[in-house]
Image (spheres, rainbow, N blue to C red):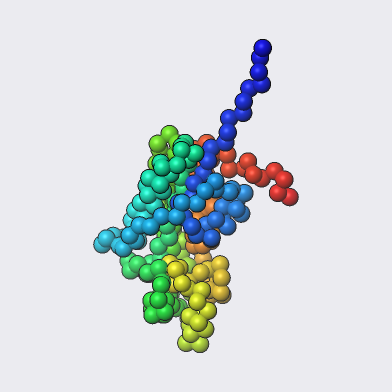
Amino acid sequence: MTGTPETAAPPKLLLASGSPRRLQLLAQAGIEPDSLLPTSVDESPLHELPRSLAKRLARSKADAARAMAARTPEFAGAFILSADTVVSVGRRILPKAEFHDQAAECLLMLSGRSHRVHTAICLLTPKGAIRQRLVETKVRFKRLSRAEMDTYLGSGEWRDKAGGYAIQGLAGTFVVRLVGSYSSVVGLPLYETVAMLEGEGFPTRRGWLGTG
């Protein structure tokens, strides 16, 4: 007696982040992670260039998430995706603002100048491959008045944001020019992320049907 062949279960995707922004960007691409594995790694620069820091932190977050996933049998054979965003003016790396004074210093540095946003993504595949990409975007801010800076600081939107601002929020009104990837500045370059997943065999469009 011949039975009906079983359909292989689709591979799982684990996002090594608890960022609502990255989750929303994946949702925009029709991708829903099977689980979130936010990690805690030391993000202090080690006398390195901004792009090197972003790549190192993305890889560290992916490795930490893999160690967490290894303790859960249902996550065996899953893809693990991580990302990290670093904002810099020249070679100076701006902090992920946690305090009012940090955010104020960032705004003073960014006012009327161009800066670069480096977002690195890292993908660990079920076959043990490690894939990394770095996306660099150039952003120019208008010259900010004292009133604009004070009001933005008062909004609190800057908290826990690289460079002390969120381009998808109020600070989007400060942007004069952007050359590169908008989604990368938000926190996850969509084109590069989807291309990387597809290149490794992950079915990125399986959730597209029925979304109209």
95 relative to 37, above or below: below
Relative depth, front residue between 68 and 50:
68
Position in image of residue 201 (x %, y %):
52, 36
Q: Residue at x 35, y 51 (%)?
A: 60
54 relative to 112, above or below: above
Q: Residue at x 46, y 45 (%)?
A: 80
Position in image of residue 116 (x %, y %):
42, 65
Relative depth, front residue between 169 and 135:
169
Q: Where, quadrant-wise, is the N terminus in this rendering?
A: top right
Q: Residue at x 51, y 74 (%)?
A: 157
195 relative to 2, above or below: below
Total numbered labels: 0
Q: Can residue 66 be seen here?
A: no
Would you say 27 lies left or right of 71 here?
A: right
> What is the quadrant of residue 97 in the picture?
bottom left
Q: Residue at x 62, y 42 (%)?
A: 205
Would you say 153 lies left or right of 55 here?
A: right
Q: Can residue 167 be seen here?
A: yes
Position in image of residue 56 (x %, y %):
34, 53
Query: Farthest top residue?
Result: 1
Query: Farthest bottom residue?
Result: 147
Would you say 91 lies left or right of 10 here?
A: left
